[in-house]
Image (cartoon, rainbow, N blue to C red):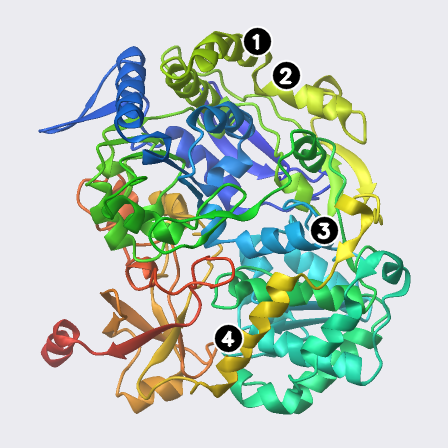
Amino acid sequence: MCGIAIETDGERILGVRADRDDPLSRGHLCVKAHALQDVHADPDRLRRPLRRTASGFEEISWREAFELAADGLTRVRRAHGRDAVAVYLGNPITHNLGAMVSLVPLLAALRTRSRFSATSVDQLPRMLVSLLLYGHQLLIPIPDIDNTDFFLIIGANPVASNGSIMTAPGIPRRIRAIQERGGQVVVVDPRRTETAAIASEHHFIRPGTDALLLLAVLHVIFEEALTRPDRLARFTDGIEDIGRLARPFSPDRVAARTGLEARVIRDLARSFALAPRAVAYGRVGISTQEFGTLATWLADVLNVVTGNLDRPGGALFATPAADVVAFTRWIRQSGSFASYRSRVRGLPEFGGELPAGVLAEEIETEGAGQIRALVTVAANPALSTPNGRRLEAALDRLEHFVAVDFYLNETTRHADLILPPTFGVEQDQYDLAYHLLAVRNTAKFAPPLFARSVDARHDWEILLELAVRYMADSTVLERIAAPVVRRVMTKLGPRGVLDLMLRAGPHRLSVGRLLRAPHGVDLGALQPTLPKRLSGKRILLAPTEFGADIGRLEKMLERPVAPAGIFQLIGRRQLRSNNSWMHNFERLTSGADRCTLLMHPDDASARGLTGGQRVRVTSRVGSVMVPLEISDAIMPGVVSLPHGWGHDRPGVRLRVATAHAGVSANDLTDESLVDALAGTASFSGVPVSVDLGAEADRATRMN
């Protein structure tokens, strides 16, 4: 989404700089952009299909690769049924026009309930709240950061993530602008993050208690008659129910559990409610916890009851040029929840997907519907899902595993076939997903910078080929449809599909017009769009599913904070390593070791630990040895480990990453810890112990 200018010499990238004329990023350059040249020229990047053999992986032709892939998948389907074939979709797909477009025929061909994606280890609660409140899982309110007076950030670190479910390049500049016009930026987080460091205020909070805090804030707002839904009241149901649900959660009652003083909670509630324009925003920290869905919901509720939804300076809905919300409504795919459940644990589906935390058990557990084959696309769940070691062991039990990826990484090393696609600078680029989440309506299309090689395949071609071959060995209707799907999709391609969406969209653009505007087209600030954008033209503010879960939350107040000697483990997002693939480049891994365990000085002193020591961190599912970093930026009783590391697995072909292996936080996270409402992984607040460990103790004595 950031505007960039790339200097080239033939097929070589010489440098990447920011495009100051881009209407959204305005000269901001994300660190990922610097790595484009490294990915393009990376000697570790796969260029031809690989097949696993007894002596290791060997290169094969595309024709042979497609035949082996389709034969293996159809063999499993014929023997065990459609649900025995699973698919796991990774985060990079959402930034890839071709992959987004070609997923439609692939998923239609597979017709499996065994679908998984990065959604359930990241933003599923956000999408579930949108589905039940607004009628569509992709109708997501975006903070109008450029016009707000009070920006409340809970469990989010947009300085490191450049937004995340809020496409906002140049966050530090935007935060400074709020403060310069007399506004406030308040961060609530168990760690003093990069965002908290430049905020007006920061308050520590115990992991997993954000829903308690938000209910206490709502308690004050209702008790002191500070609600002002204004025009929203005309098309919102359930405002009175919120007052009733919040009544038991006074600031005095939740203070000890959350770690925030009752006085601070009351001041926060009043400041938010009385600000001329305010917006509450939460992300990964509130989504990936035991009460992630409730916390995400209550942030939206706070915006509604104070009249800050669908108004400038509050939270608004984007109107993207290629309107994915309108398109998915047209094909009747607004979303679904709990229409079926996982075989083993009974966790609910969402949007046709099961929570990623059940993938391992669904492979391991015998019986009807057992997963026996898997297709992964741009995914590395061995490092990104809870208890990754268990999943890795399960992957080796599959009868057939096809990975669409251009790296031999911690997950794809278990595959029978690896099908490598082209990379971004060889593809058409238009971000269908993140324009939905942008703080300003813009549109930008970039054609390929380099022509692909003769023997290369785009990801959309790979996924289409798998879909068509799978259909050709299915029902009579699918066999008839297969060549038609191939002809239509090949003729249109991703660019043709995008052109149709742009022409049908609210701004009536076209690919041709965008090609004539290489810096992008500014379509204006976000504007109020409700109730027009709502399904049913009403907001259902208090869905029964959420209200019923309040009782489970209230029981948290009866629990001890943590047993003696036990810490709460949280994650840590880092600017230069948001994703595991970013670890294979020297420019992004240089400098001090960033895979460290963060601990408060008081906690370290009480255990006789010093910075730089290697300590052992142990959870129910595993143990890792990691260097200790001592800092008052972390709340006492809490420790933090960044995600995406753990490149010490044998057989990977990631030379730089292996030299900076680190440890995987998901060797500690526990797949049994979930948000019971949504079934999503609870990464925040995992109970762990920390000690010197035998290995570290010997090294300390030697030194």
Dot 3 lies on which element? Answer: helix
Is the Cβ of the residue at disc 4 closer than 8 Å to that at disc 3? no
Query: As shown in the figure, which amino acid type bears the numbered disc 4?
Result: Pro
- Mark 1 lies on residue: 491
- Mark 4 lies on residue: 190
Q: Residue at x 25, y 24 (%)?
A: 50
Q: Of circles 3 and 1, which is in front? A: 3
Q: Of circles 4 and 3, which is in front? A: 3
How far apart are the alpha carbons under marks 3 and 1?
A: 36 Å
Q: Earlier in the sequence, mark 4 or mark 1?
A: 4
The picture places residue 195, in percent across and down from the top left corner, at 59, 66
Circle number at residue 134: 3
Q: Nearer the viewer, residue 358 or 614?
A: 358
Q: Residue at x 35, y 46 (%)?
A: 381
How far apart are the alpha carbons under marks 1 and 2?
A: 8 Å
Left or right: 369 in relation to 110? left
Instruction: Judge whether residue 213 can be spotted in this image.
Output: yes
The picture places residue 502, in percent across and down from the top left corner, at 73, 25
Left or right: 181 in relation to 678? right
Quarter of image, res 51: top left
- Mark 2 lies on residue: 496
Q: Residue at x 28, y 69 (%)?
A: 627
Query: As shown in the figure, which amino acid type bears the numbered disc 1?
Result: Lys
